[in-house]
Amino acid sequence: MSLSITAIILTYNEELHIARCIENIKQISDQVYVIDSFSTDKTAEIAEGMGAIVIKHIWPGNQAEQFNWALENIDINSKWIFRLDADEYLLAELINEINTKLPMLDSNITGVVFKRRHIFLGKWIKRGEYPKLILRLFQKGKAVCEQRLMDEHIELLEGEDIEFKHDFVDHNLHNLAWWTEKHNNYSIRDAIETLDIELNIIGKAKDDKDKIIGQGAVSKRKKKHKYTRLPLFWRAALYFIYRFFLKGGFLEGKEAFLWHFFQGWWYRTLVDAKIFEIKKHCGSDVEKIKEYIKENYEIEL
C-alpha cells in the first residue's frame, strides 16, 4: 500500500551522502525531490541516476527560504511531505513504524515527530543530548518551515503532532576539517539568533512560544532562552560540564569527548566570541549591530 509521501532533500555538494539518502527514503516515499543549489560535484547526476527529480535553485541564504520555496514551487501530489537532509537516513525500525502507523493516524494529526541520533566519527553518541525530537513529516498544506537563520523547524499551521518511537540518523561522513569549517560558518548565524533573544534585533525569538514545532523543539527553545541569560563564555563551559559529566558523556570514549568538546564547548565559545566581538564594536545599539553584521559577515538583517 502506498503511503503517499513526497521527500524533499536540499543539497549542495552532497555526492558523499546523496545515494545513501535516496536509497533509504525511497522505501517509504513515492517521489523524491532534490533541490540543488548548483552543486559543483556529482550530486545532481547521482540523484537523477537514482530516479530523483532534481531541481536547481539558487541558494537564498538559509535553509528555511530554500525549503519553503520548494513547498511553493514543486508539484507535490502526495498527502504527506518528508523533509530529510542529505546526510541523514531512517533506521529500518522507523521505516517499518511509518509503514504501519501512518495510514492509521487520526485526521487531526498533521505532523510526526521523530528521534534523531548523531553518529560522530563512526560512533553513536548516546549520552549527553540524545534523543533530539524533531518534526520532519507533515501533511501537505498544513505546515511551513519557520523563517530563521539557524535551528529552523517545521511549523504546523493547523492540526496536532504525534511522536513516533524509532530513530532517524544524522551521520555525516566528512572529516573534522570540514566539520569545523561548517560550524564556524554556523556560529555567526547562531550569534545573531542569540542576540535576537537578548536585544530583539530581528524580532523572531519573541514568537517562539506561539509555534507548533513539536515539544522537543519547544523545550530546546526554552532552554536556549535561559542559556542566553547566563554570563558570556561561562555558559559554554557549564554546558560542556552538563553534557559530558552530568549527562554521562564521559562514559562513551574518545569520540564522545570530541563531540561534546567541539559541539558543546568549542562551538558555543565561538558563538560567544562573535557576540563579544559584535558588542565590543556596537554595544547594544541594534542598528549598529545590523550594519556591522552586514559589513563584516555579509548577512542582511
Image (cartoon, rainbow, N blue to C red):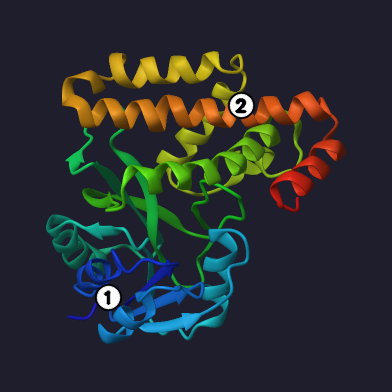
Q: On the picture, is 121 further left or further right than 260? A: left
Label 2, secondary structure: give it.
Answer: helix
In the rendered image, the vertical position of residue 58 relative to residue 283, given as above or below: below
Q: Badge 2, how many Cα within 10 Å: few under 14, some, many 20+?
A: some
Which residue corresponds to mark 1?
Answer: 29
Q: On the picture, is 65 further left or further right than 74? A: right
Question: Would you identify the image quadrant in which residue 23 lies?
Answer: bottom left
- Looking at the rendered structure, the kind of residue marked 1 is Ser
Q: Earlier in the sequence, mark 2 or mark 1?
A: 1
Q: Residue 134: horizontal and vertical position, in percent?
A: 38, 48
Q: Could you tell me how far apart the alpha carbons at marks 2 and 1 are, in whole angstroms?
A: 43 Å
Q: Residue 281: horizontal and vertical position, in percent?
A: 80, 28
In the rendered image, the vertical position of residue 228 relative to residue 217, given as above or below: above
In the rendered image, the vertical position of residue 121 relative to residue 106, given as above or below: above
- Looking at the rendered structure, the kind of residue marked 2 is Ala
> Which residue is at 75% across, 53% downward?
300
Q: Nearer the viewer, mark 2 or mark 1?
A: 2
Q: Residue 205: horizontal and vertical position, in percent?
A: 65, 39
Label 1, secondary structure: give it.
Answer: loop
Which quadrant of the figure contains the N terminus? bottom left
Residue 223 in sight = no
Which residue corresponds to mark 2?
Answer: 273
